[in-house]
Image (cartoon, rainbow, N blue to C red):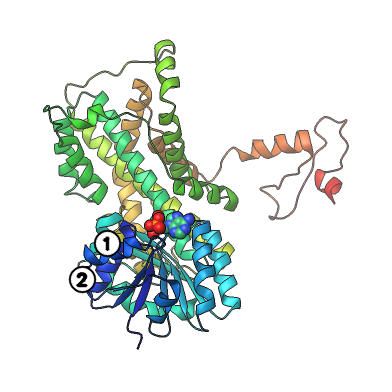
Amino acid sequence: MPKADIGLIGLAVMGQNLVMNMNDHGFTVAVYNRTTSKVDEFLAGPAKGSKVVGTRSIEEFVAALKKPRRVMLMVKAGEVVDQFIAQVVPHLEKGDIVIDGGNSLYTDTQRRVEELGKKGLLFLGSGISGGEEGARHGPSIMPGGAPEAWAAVKPIFQAISAKVEDGTPCCDWVGKGGSGHYVKMVHNGIEYGDIQLICETYHLMRAAGCSNTEMAEIFSAWNRSELLSYLIEITAKILAYKDTDGSHLVDHILDAAGQKGTGKWTSIDALELGMPLTLISEAVYARCLSALKEDRVTAAKVLPGPAPKPLKDRKEFVESLRQALYASKIVSYAQGFMLMREASRQYGWDLNFGAIALMWRGGCIIRSIFLGDIKKAFDRKKDLHNLLLDDFFKKAMTGAQSGWRSALARSLEWGIPAPCMTSALAFYDGYRSDRLPANLLQAQRDYFGAHTYERLDKPRGQFFHTNWTGTGGSVSSTTYNA
Ligand code: 2AM
């Protein structure tokens, strides 16, 4: 008699931890791994004494599963996922479920949902965040795909996920198609933004003359404010951390950032959808610029700029930085939700934004009380058009605005780059402008390319062309294209 509630393929660290988490919650898990010795090592190691069922072939693995079979893949994203799908599918029956819990590109997930759907199989692409710790003790889980599969997976996923204070799981149904992996991708993009914002804050504090110890204390204090979050918490700990020789380890770390691509994917999709995801994109570029270490070392010797002036009274400056960080973070999340709103519309997903905020509230890298405030905003108004228009965030922006502007004035004056904070402010000022200079832009396009323009005094959708030079004629480019 098959006895496993779920099967998991891929016993790398995330896979192993998820299995143990499921086991702790009373589920029987069958496991398989390409290198089968890892199954034996797992059973003799972390899974010793558990109910985990080790299997050494795909046939044995599938045979161990109760129906409808639930097969979860925790393998390398890309072709490997397709290879395992091809291996298990011949052994599955209509109504069985395949879940990809890896970091897959959402378009791949979209395709897999369709392909398996044609065979009567239910495919889910589920974002999972929280690293190894999260996987073991409660990650944030973002499942999407074939809606018919959700009821069969929900009890397991909600049991093992992180919980917020009132016990609500940080796992809910995201939507159809590739939406689960999409939302995870945006989560990672937002993570890029949050990290870069903290780094810019650190850079400016350091330029103002703060020591690592002082900065550690400041971030600790901020972690008791509306900025309370996992990333602020670990920043305080990192800044306080001493190397074996008693010096601060952070000062010895090479300033060249790595990246795995999910931030870039988010920016690429924002460009595709025509959404101004400026902050996350700047965060991706900031990593790229940091990686040009040798160029920067050369340029630092030859390119002039102003010098920072250490401040005697840093208290006010530090408070302005806190406001700059908070306001920029609000803009970043507003942009992230704008992107998801547009993706939901264009890809037909019907995303539940309040549920997404709740899924990110705990368990994942961007977890914070701030996400609780976002959840409340969507509770107040389910179809909230933009976070910046919610009363709570409107008030927060009003309160933080002067500090934000003065902190950035210093950044410009001192020549300390703060690309994310600066782009956030430019976005904010652009978003609240009822008139931008695009009238001139449209005039230029019409001048050189007869691209036409609309008029303020005429209904939208009526297009005009002017013969600006008197020699170009009155034929517009749309006429040429027709
Ligand atoms: P392995 O232990 O046999 O290497 C994360 O790397 C997980 O993906 C591991 O379980 C790993 O299996 C699996 N994996 C990576 N590349 C693979 C491949 N080409 N074929 C099968 N499994 C692979």
Residue 253 at what x, y percent from top left? 27, 30
Any atom of ligand 1 within 8 Å of the CB at mark 1?
no
At a point 28% along the width and 41% down the height, the residue shown is: 323
The kind of residue tagged 1 is Glu
Looking at the image, residue 24 lies above or below residue 305: below
Instruction: Name the secondary structure under disc 2.
Output: loop
Quarter of the image with the N terminus in it: bottom left
Residue 237 at what x, y percent from top left? 17, 41
- Indicate left or right for 56 with 176 as reference: left
Residue 242 appearing in the image: yes
Instruction: Name the secondary structure under disc 1.
Output: helix
Judging by the rendered image, the residue that carries numbered circle 2 is: 166
At a point 15% along the width and 36% down the height, the residue shown is: 240
At a point 34% along the width and 21% down the height, the residue shown is: 414
Q: Nearer the viewer, residue 37 or 286?
A: 37
Foreground mark, 2 or 1, reads 1
Any mark on residue 41, and which? 1
- Indicate left or right for 315 with 100 as reference: left
- Indicate left or right for 279 with 241 as reference: right
